[in-house]
Image (cartoon, rainbow, N blue to C red):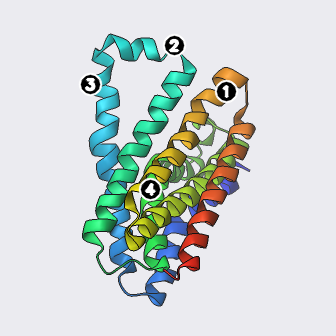
Amino acid sequence: MLLASLIIGIVICCGLPVAGLAFLMRRRKGTGKAFAWGVAAFVVSQLFIRIPILQLVLPNFGWFAVMQLYPWRYGLFLGLTAGLAEETARWIAIRYFLKGKNTLEHGLAFGLGHGGIEAILLVGLNMVAAVVMVLTGQGAQFPADGGSVLLAGVERLFAMAFHVGASLLILYGVRTGSSVWYWTLAVALHGVLDAAVVILPAVFGVGVLGIELWAAVFGSLTLALGVWLCQKRKV
């Protein structure tokens, strides 16, 4: 069960972005570049800027420690800072580095790059290491069971759906001259999605399945909205 779940998780976290990129590159020129800029947007905004600030800078301030005692404040803070960082990086990349590459396929590739590298770095690599442990007889040392691993893979699937949808919103805003409005919408959606991960269990006692259901619904709706807008205007 554990090995099967790990393989499914790896297919989702690593295989899906790569397969999606290969498919899009056959359909539209420039999607490889869009995918690469999606990767860069996540790496720069999160790994180089936001996470170091959260882990190395803010713990030196008393207000940050106090805020963590209040789930609503802390959840909204984490959610909105994630939204501000990632959606701003998305907008900069799409606005300034993907000029002329603003079709639906380019937006899909950008979102797959952004969400895909997040899935690979946060979950996929750990799953690959776990497969090695299982195959070498060390599976008992892995700290999660098959069900938890499978759930983590499914969660990444809907996280990627959100990132693709948010990328399409930003692309649509740039394409139609409504960047401020759609950037604001993407930040708000991102903030609400991430804030719920803290608020739902701490305030409402929601369990893991409830949180994953929230992510599934929210990610799917964001993706559907992005695709609908782009198809509506034939972007």
Q: Looking at the image, is mark 1 or mark 3 earlier in the sequence?
A: 3
Query: Circle 1 — which element?
Result: helix
Query: Circle 2 — which element?
Result: loop
**Residue type, mark 4 in image:** Trp
Q: Where is residue 82 in the image (x, y as percent from the top left)?
A: 42, 41
In this rendered view, identify the residue nearer to me: 151 or 127. Answer: 151
Q: Mark 1 points at which residue?
A: 201
As measured in the structure, the alpha-carbon distance from the residue carrying label 1 to the one carrying label 2 is 14 Å
Q: Residue at x 29, y 31 (%)?
A: 53
Q: Mark 2 points at which residue?
A: 69
Q: Residue at x 50, y 23 (%)?
A: 73
Residue 146 visible (yes or no): no
Determine whether 9 is above or below 113 in the image: above
Q: For residue 137, which quarter of the picture? A: top right
As measured in the structure, the alpha-carbon distance from the residue carrying label 3 to the one carrying label 2 is 18 Å
Q: Looking at the image, is mark 3 or mark 2 earlier in the sequence?
A: 3
Q: Which residue is drawn at 56% across and 56% down?
A: 162
**Residue type, mark 2 in image:** Leu
Relative placement, left or right, of 58 versus 5 is left
As measured in the structure, the alpha-carbon distance from the residue carrying label 4 to the one carrying label 3 is 31 Å
Query: Circle 3 — which element?
Result: helix
Q: Looking at the image, is mark 1 or mark 2 earlier in the sequence?
A: 2
**Do labels 1 and 4 touch, CB within 8 Å?**
no
**Do labels 1 and 3 touch, CB within 8 Å?**
no
Q: Name the residue under label 3.
A: 57
Instruction: Say the numbered circle drawn on residue 181.
Output: 4
**Residue type, mark 1 in image:** Pro
**Residue type, mark 3 in image:** Val
Q: Looking at the image, is mark 1 or mark 4 earlier in the sequence?
A: 4
